[in-house]
Image: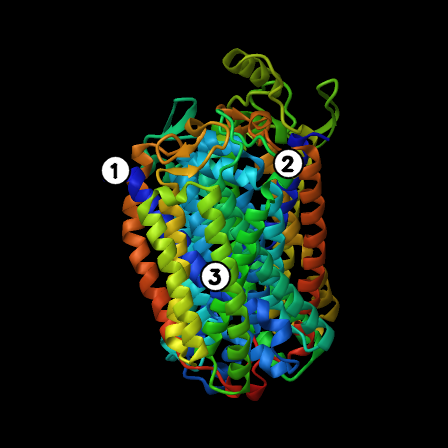
Amino acid sequence: MDVLALSRWQFAITTIYHFLFVPLTLGLSIFIALLETCYVQTKHEEWKKSCRQLVKFFGTVFLINFAMGVITGIVQEFHFGMNWSEYSRFMGDIFGAPLALEALTAFFLESTFLGIWLFGWDKLSPKLHCACIWIVAFASNLSAFWILVANSFMQHPVGFIVRNGRAEMTDFAALITNPYAIGQYAHTLFSGVVTSGMLILAVCAYKILQNGTARDAFEKCMRYAVIYALAGLFAVMGSGHLQAQQVARMQPMKLASMEALWESADPAPLAAMAIIDVKNERNPLEINIPYLLSFMVYNQPTGEIRGIHQLQKEYEQQYGPGDYKPDIQGLFLSFRGMAGIGGLMLLLALVTGLLAWKKKLNAHRMFLRLLILALPLPFLANSLGWYLTEAGRQPWIVVGLQKTAAAFSPNLTPGEVFISLMGFTIIYLILAAAALYAAVRFIRRTPAANDRRDA
Amino acid sequence: MDLNILWFILITVLFTGFFFLEGFDYGVGMTIPFISSSENNRTLVINTIAPVWDGNEVWMITAGGALFAAFPHVYATMFSTFYLALFIMLVGLILRGAGLELRGKHESYTWRRLWDWAICLGSAIPAFLWGVAVTNLLRGLPISDKMIYMGTFYDLLSPYTVVGGITFLLVFLFHGMAFLNLRLVEGSLTHRMRDWAIRVGALAIFFFLVCIAMTYTLTDLFRSTLAAGLLFGAAICFAGAYLASFHRRGIPAFIGSALAIACTTVAFFAGLFPRLMVSSLQPEWSLTIYNASSTPYTLTIMSIAAGCLVPIVLIYQGWSYWIFRKRLSRKDLELY
């Protein structure tokens, strides 16, 4: 493999790994902040005590996850210069700003106040302490905004001019109000809510099954978590729908590829399932739902969706000869995988909600076990979503401006990148094992909190 | 003063903050496997940096981000030049971060001893490699007219850069010990720390002086009077810190090592100015604050943002140190 392919693998592996932790940070920080607000506000003694236990309990789970997010995040920040120096030169005037702003506005806030929050239980008033976790939640979600502003420029460049052989920023306001960024941000934020919601449901299910001293607290927590997860699921689906409409306007090739739509169509059907023959550029077998794709894109049963063949021709005219098709098979499957998992999670959450409402969670132990087994689902959906987003812009690194093949660092040798690729992969596997071990052990052993005096 | 110079100063400030704050985190981290065989003592030592290390590390992340935003060519050339070195540094930082956060999550002797070593190595590796990087940048690197590094990984290692690495490691170790002496309640631990600081400090002074001498012969840093003055200032501050720790004066010792680190960092940048990366092939191929910078538009936006935000960051980070100002003793053993 050459430097380009190795660098792409390295970026893909480290990014997807990093993003296993990020959504949990986004959603769990808000949930813990809500719980601690309950703790501060409630007059009910018993519930107050439970809230504090739950906050400390989930605080530890959050901390393990947050630490993993932080240490894998540094790798991401260094990566652009290390492996993609030509990209950094071409894009630095635009791309560096949101990254620096992310550090200045968000990283400082979240890490400083998380430190204060963790170690400040006895040093701050309850209200001030609660404010600290709200600041952490705010800052985490702000950092996601900045990095998505940066990513959105790669998907849909705005507010720039190509001059002196590079892209130069001309309109900062346009950059941060990029409609693509707004759509992507909403979808990411809500997927964080879903991910943390599903995690809390699984953990609570486990603690209810375990039948320990704090069972009642976890049962009550589960009732809140299911509302949280359901709200997240509806919002993630709604924002996903809006985002797909944006993709249709801004990245028609991505849309056509994830639907494996070779020829333009009006009205366009949605392929529920298809066998794709990428080599001969056709689908030998497909099960279509008529009108549906046009309807999803235009909110009406008609409207033209351009197919891959037509777009390929248009791009050749615009950008010169080349292959402008992304990984069609992969996009088609990852979109269906992501959406399907979303549906499955919605079903699980609805059943949980029903059982919680009827106060019958305890009676359905098989279902509680199912919830624990379902824990990988949101993480899988998140990874598939990012595959869709990033593989869908290939062969471009910045759509229309720079190709991925022109972006890597020319001074590197395949041997060097091979060493780092292997190194990161191995250390990430070890880390995953260690973090999972610590988290599972903690969840299993802790009655309700790491503060045993309270228990 | 133009924006390019302003950003050069701001990058200097960010690296100074980074070396000052993470300097003692690295130093404290390096002592952990050796400080005491008692589990309680080790936890106590880790708890001196546990609430703040992550916020301190953000100084490095911000410095990197600021380089990217203000001088993208420097970011691109520097990070690809130091590719394998940075990979090793990242592995170190990963080990350290994981160690600091995961260590306390499981009560097992083996688990904790393993993470102690991870924290130690993960602190020593970046400390050493930053010294290697700084001396390499001063000496100059084979950079082409296209701003691309023409050397290999092994070209980064020379007697001078290894001495630079050892100097950074020892100075940070001393700095960390001085920090511990301020943060722990007087006792057997602080006494041991002081004994060690005297030995480590002597070694550090030796390497510091060798490093200054090599800098004089191998680089053009001394062409700048400001840089030369600051470097001597740093040596004097460090000697002062050493004497203070010898006489059991905790606060002057820490201030001395902090000033030495700050002066060295500023001297480094002053010696480079207006360059950020020196080409050893052709002086005019060096990356400067003008040929490697972002557009005035981007620099203006970033200047406004940094002007508003950096003071706020300083205030709340200062506040966090104020909250945790009390010296730690056996009562503060709660694990996180």
Contact (Cβ within 8 Å) of mark 3 with mark 2: no
- Residue named by callout 2: A7
Residue nearest the viewer, comparing B43 with A353: B43
The amino acid at mark 3 is Glu
Kindly indicate the quadrant of the structure image that contains residue B220: top left
Tell me whether marks 3 and 2 sit on the same chain.
no
Measured as percent of width and height from the top left, residue B224 is found at 34, 44
Q: Whole-percent x and y of residue B181? A: 47, 78
Give residue A73's position: percent from left, percent from top: 55, 51
Tell me the residue that label 1 is attached to. B2
The quarter of the image holding the N terminus of chain A is: top right
- Which quadrant would residue A385 be assigned to in this image? top right
Chain for disc number 1: B
Q: Which mark is residue B22?
A: 3
Residue B139 or A445: which is nearer the viewer? B139
Task: Place residue A328 in its image quadrant.
Answer: top right
